Amino acid sequence: MTSRRLVLLGALALFQAAPATSHTALPPASPVAQSEEYAQICMGEIEAPDAERRSACDAALQVELGRADRADLLASRGWLEQGRGRRQAALRAFETALRINAGHLAALRGRAAVLSELGRHREAEAILAAGLEAGQATASLLVDRANLRERRGDLAGARKDLDHGLRLDPSSAWARLARARLLQRIGEDEGALEDLDMALEIEPAVASHHYRRGLSLSALGRPAEAVQAFERALRLEPAVARGWVE
């Protein structure tokens, strides 16, 4: 919970606890302040359950906003819909955001992700390629395309994208994990272990990094270290990691 929300809740508790005679009418929040808070909830800047975030997105989108703000809100709405499996609603939100801003990174990635989930891998890859050609050579786009290429069996293309992504952003733990997974798949566990060690320097409390590290250590004939890595994964995410290990 953010400090802002804690302060608001504390103020509300004091107000409710005060005697009725001491209550003073509070001025209503201005429409601008209210719409700003809706936008912050929608974008995840203020913590809230997903249902509340979706409602906040809808409320914020009812207000007159600049084009950039509308595209951001629509992209956020799209990812929320994608997360609950409502692919067509997500696709509509992403496409509307892209009509406002054709180069919106989150909307580009979201549209490609949904199309891939719908089995339209070539279309998804074309969207990512267009983003890269337009100069958005970000590690995230390259990792997204690498995942698509790996899914359709183009392991060399996936490796090329991951290598490129990590040259652009060596500190991306997500890209490190993606390349480690690919290297494990093709039997290059030494390289995978290097990537996982670096990912753990950046994100030491992520169970999947420890689990993947255990797989490579096991493949390299280092069982004692592998067991330690699996145990760390279990401590961090008991329910999820137990399924991996079993």
Image: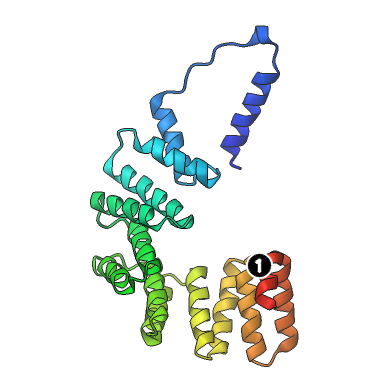
Give the percent coordinates (x, y) of residue 173. Answer: 52, 69
**Quadrant into which the N terminus falls:** top right
Q: Position of residue 189 (x, y in %)?
A: 57, 88
Q: Secondary structure at mark 1?
A: helix
**Quarter holding residue 109:** bottom left
Q: Residue at x 67, y 70 (%)?
A: 241
Q: Is residue 232 above or below residue 98?
A: below
How has the structure been colored for display? rainbow
* Image side of residue 64 versus residue 143, left or right: left
Quick one: 148 or 209, which is closer to the camera? 148
Nearer to us in this view, 8 or 116: 116
Pick the quarter of the image with the C terminus.
bottom right
Q: Position of residue 158 (x, y in %)?
A: 39, 81
Q: Name the residue rendered at 67%, 22% in the picture.
A: 14
Residue 137 placed where, x, y %? 32, 68
- Could one spot residue 17 in this view of the protein? yes
Q: As rendered, which of 88 and 188 lies closer to the eye?
A: 88
Q: Amino acid at mark 1?
A: Val
Judging by the rendered image, the residue that carries numbered circle 1 is 240
Could you tell me if residue 171 is visible in this image? Answer: no
Asked if residue 2 is positioned above or below residue 246 in the image, the reply reads above
Q: Is residue 4 above or below residue 102?
A: above
